[in-house]
Image: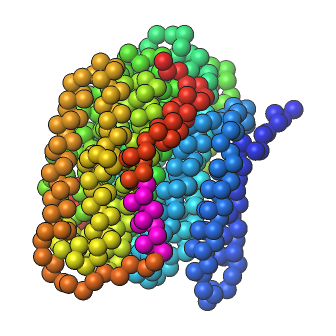
Amino acid sequence: MIALDHYLLLSGLVFAIGILGVTTSRSVLKILLSLELLLAASNLSFVAFSKFNGDYNGQLIVFFVILVAAAEVAIGLAIIVLMYQRLSTIQADELKEMKW
Amino acid sequence: MFPTINWSLISLESFMTLTLVVLVIMDISLPKKTNRDWIGIVSFGSLFGLIAFWLTQHNLSGSTFGGMFVMDSLAWFFKGFFLLAMVFVFAMTQQYFKALGGRRNEFYLLLWLALIGMSLIASAADFLILFIALEIMTISLYVMTAYLKSDKLSLEAGMKYLILGALSSGFFLYGISFLYGVTHSTRFEAILGYVGTHAMNPMMLFGMVLVFSAVAFKIAAIPFHMWVPDVYQGAPTPVTALLSVGSKAAGFVMLMRLFFGIFAPWHQEWGLTLAVLSAITMTYGNLVAMFQTNIKRLLGYSSISHAGYLLMGAAAGTVLGASAMNFYLLGYLFTNLAAFLVIVLVFVAIKSDEIADYAGLSKRSGLLAATLLLALVSLAGMPPLAGFFGKFALLVSVIQSGYTWLALIAAVNIVISLYYYLLIVKRIYVDAPKVTSPILVSSSMKLLLSFAILGIIVIGIFQGPFLDAAITAVRGMAFGFIK
């Protein structure tokens, strides 16, 4: 029987992978992917809580989160394209004009 | 079947959205060659109209959309705050892009979007609305930060802001999911009901810390301050001004709703943590600011230290603390926007933000130098200007709550900050200018500069009505839970 704990464990794992990806990746594209994992982890825990609490608001929230995530990716990709045009690279450590 | 919606409560946001939609439709439907400078003029006009409309709303209170949207005295106070900040930011935008050339019309549309987001944050009474409002504001700020496509610094700032900002929204959402899981609701009222009747537990603590981290990101508190210096330096100056006042105030109104509202019954658990964060934040900001050579970067570190001062009010956790935060933010609005307005006008003339290039500014433009002097001295907290009384009220509030050590650290910090603010003053008044040609300021900008100066001085000397407004805003707060 799969209980709430299992879902939360999975979502925590996905969240941790996302954080790890954001902090260790050099490619901006990979960082953007990892950021999406963070939102996916939150969605999973929303749905799990919603199911086990017997309350549908949590599933409603997920739709809004998906919408926001799409907007964020659109802006993120636009800035990455801009970066590639200007610097011919998408490595995060090339962004060193200012002290980090 | 459907709950009745009270549209009068949400009318301010509705008019903002209407303005934005009309502007967007006209922008895309007019032929490409048409001159589009009218977008700026229409924006200014509707902004003043909205301010007049906002003044009529001061007695409005209640909640609608099934309790997800609330209009109370705190929301009213901050909506006026954001509208006033936008007057300055629109003026800066107009000056800044006139000098740089290029397309600037979409910029006004993005500013409107950010304004709608900020207004909704002030009125949010549900974590879902709060999250969406926060994203509306932040996503438009990402675009504006990276707006100067040909400028490497702007691009770098945009990228860094996007990555760290998205990271903080990830934290925020994950935190909300835990608060929702424990309390079975995202409505502030329901969460306050839970918090008021239960002891702290690990899942709630986890959610609270994650939600606070997103707030700390917005107000630029340690340890979520890393983006501030780079983004402040690289972003177009009007955006920097908006980040330092609008986005910061949006963070503080969130902080008030959370820590003077729904988490207030647990004040004993988080009070000390906020006090320690406040001490570290102000000390770090002031120490690093001393070594800066770029004025926008310096104001970025100064903005970190001001977040530290403001957190004192939250750590105090009393009505006085919250009112002091409101009052301080009001003074900070005039002070900081005056400084940024001068930075924009100087940049337009000399195309540089380096402090070294400000040498002898007083001989090139007396008004600009005087405004910058007043703003810096008020930021440092010298009487009788706006910054002084705000700091005084914050210090009193923490001493009353028993954090005397925090007040002492803040006092030391104020002395440290005097050093680097006065270093700039010395540069503009004592040093000899490299170029002696005068910097011309248009009469409309002279008017706005005088308005900012008036704000700094009047708030500092006649604190009464402003302090009353700040206290009223806190007292009438919905879901407020403070002694």
Residue at 35% of width from left, 78% of height from top?
B348
- x and y, in percent, of residue B55 in the image: 64, 50
Tell whether B128 sits left or right of B99.
Answer: right
Q: State the extent of the magenta-drawn residues as a range.
A: B444-455
Location of residue B225 with respect to B299 vertically, above or below? above
In this rendering, position of residue B385 left or right of residue B50: left
**What residue is drawn where x is 32% and y is 35%?**
B392
Using the rendered image of the protein, determine whether residue B39 is visible from the camera's viewpoint: yes
Compare residues A50 and B304 and report the one nearer the observer: B304
Q: Which residue lies furthest to the bottom in this view?
A: B33
Residue B296, placed above or below residue B119: below
- Residue A7 in the image: x percent, y percent? 51, 25
Residue at left 34%, top 68%? B342
Residue A71 in sight here? no
Q: Position of residue B104 (x, y in %)?
A: 50, 76
> Front-most of B170 and B110?
B110
Foreground residue, B240 or B169?
B240
Q: Main secondary structure of the magenta part?
A: helix
